[in-house]
């Protein structure tokens, strides 16, 4: 699992859009060797008029994709109102960047037994991020890992600025595993693979990649989605980089931590 010796790759679409879309992409990322599946059912969108996710139906489609592929699913929990539903279906609950300091939500998630992936806030310092993790730990949930997804800095060429420096910094200051999400960090498809390779070289425990087979039709984050063929190529490169560092890929379909 995440934090063990092997590299863990989480992949899937930004959002669950339909049964066909979710199953098609799930099969492709499984075939390429991903160990976990992602897909948002509740989406935190900047505009209230943008697609907000399929909601509970999306959770059920994730469960269907898990059943078919055997891959555990990671999905975002937006608020306390939908927490029980998300906890019922998800194997790992994602706290998004915009919720990193939603302390009421963190306290409730701290009381769950399920693993939590805590994304870094849009402009959070490392101390603030680790204190948010402390909200989960202090309520009793020790099964958590961090996800660097880029921060708001001066950038006129990318969606965010990937702070790879924070990977060794987290390892110095904390026992928590850290993964990197180069999809949201760049927002640009062509930059996702280079930053994923760099993240593995920097010592990340895992990587999360958005994948879509019809990115021009995607309801969310199409411009940063990797095509499944390019994702498969990236997986080969990541295994080689991990191998050069004396690590391997984690065994597929491990549930939670192991
Ligand atoms: C996501 O991973 O789907 C997402 C919305 O990311 P972030 O919270 O990092 O923007
Ligand atoms: Mn996205």
Image (spheres, helix red, strand yellow):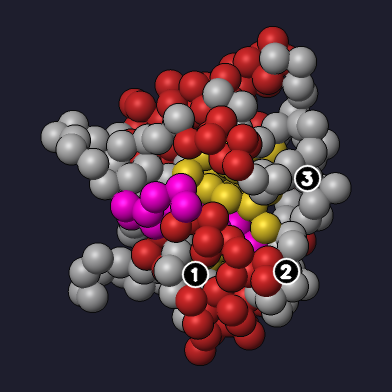
Answer with mark 2 or mark 1, whichever residue precedes in sequence: 1
Q: Within 10 Å of the Cα at label 2, are there few (<14), some (14-19), or many (20+) other Cα atoms?
A: many
- Residue that sits furthest to the bottom in the current view: 81
Q: In which quarter of the image is residue 99?
A: bottom left
| For residue 246, side relative to residue 117 (left or right) | right
- 27 part of magenta stretch: no
Q: Where is residue 149 in the image (x, y as percent from the top left)?
A: 43, 45
Q: Position of residue 30 (x, y in %)?
A: 68, 41
Q: Does the residue labelled 1 lie within 8 Å of ligand 1?
A: no
Q: Position of residue 14 (x, y in %)?
A: 44, 54
Regarding mark 2 in the picture, which secondary structure is present there? loop
Q: Which of marks 3 and 1 is in front?
A: 3
Q: Within 10 Å of the Cα at label 3, are there few (<14), some (14-19), or many (20+) other Cα atoms?
A: many
- Residue that sits furthest to the left in the current view: 156
Q: Which of 61 and 131 is in front in this view?
A: 131
Regarding mark 1 in the picture, which secondary structure is present there? loop
| Span shown in magenta | 116-127
Tag shown at residue 1? 3
Q: Circle 2 sits on which residue? A: 141
Q: Nearer the viewer, residue 89 or 184?
A: 184
């Amino acid at each position: 699992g995440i934090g063990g010796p092997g590299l863990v790759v989480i992949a899937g679409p930004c959002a669950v859009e339909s049964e066909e879309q979710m199953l098609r992409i799930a099969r492709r990322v499984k075939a390429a060797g991903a160990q976990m599946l992602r897909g948002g059912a509740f989406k935190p969108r900047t505009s209230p008029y943008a697609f907000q996710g399929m909601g509970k139906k999306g959770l059920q489609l994730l469960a269907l994709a898990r059943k078919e592929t055997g891959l555990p699913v990671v999905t975002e929990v937006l608020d306390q109102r939908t927490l029980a539903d998300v906890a019922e279906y998800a194997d790992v609950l994602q706290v998004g960047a915009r919720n990193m300091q939603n302390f009421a939500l963190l306290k409730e998630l701290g009381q769950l037994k399920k693993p939590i992936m805590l994304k870094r806030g849009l402009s959070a310092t490392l101390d603030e991020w680790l204190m948010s993790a402390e909200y989960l730990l202090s309520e009793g949930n020790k099964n958590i890992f961090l996800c660097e997804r880029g921060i708001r800095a001066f950038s006129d060429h990318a969606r965010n600025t990937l702070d790879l420096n924070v990977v060794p910094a987290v390892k110095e200051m904390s026992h928590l595993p850290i993964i990197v999400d180069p999809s949201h960090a760049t927002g640009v498809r062509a930059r996702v693979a280079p930053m994923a390779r760099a993240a593995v070289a920097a010592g990340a425990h895992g990587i999360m990649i958005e994948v879509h087979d019809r990115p021009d039709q995607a309801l969310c984050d199409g411009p940063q989605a990797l095509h499944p063929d390019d994702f498969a190529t990236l997986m080969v490169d990541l295994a080689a980089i991990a191998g050069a560092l004396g690590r391997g890929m984690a065994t597929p379909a491990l549930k939670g931590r192991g």
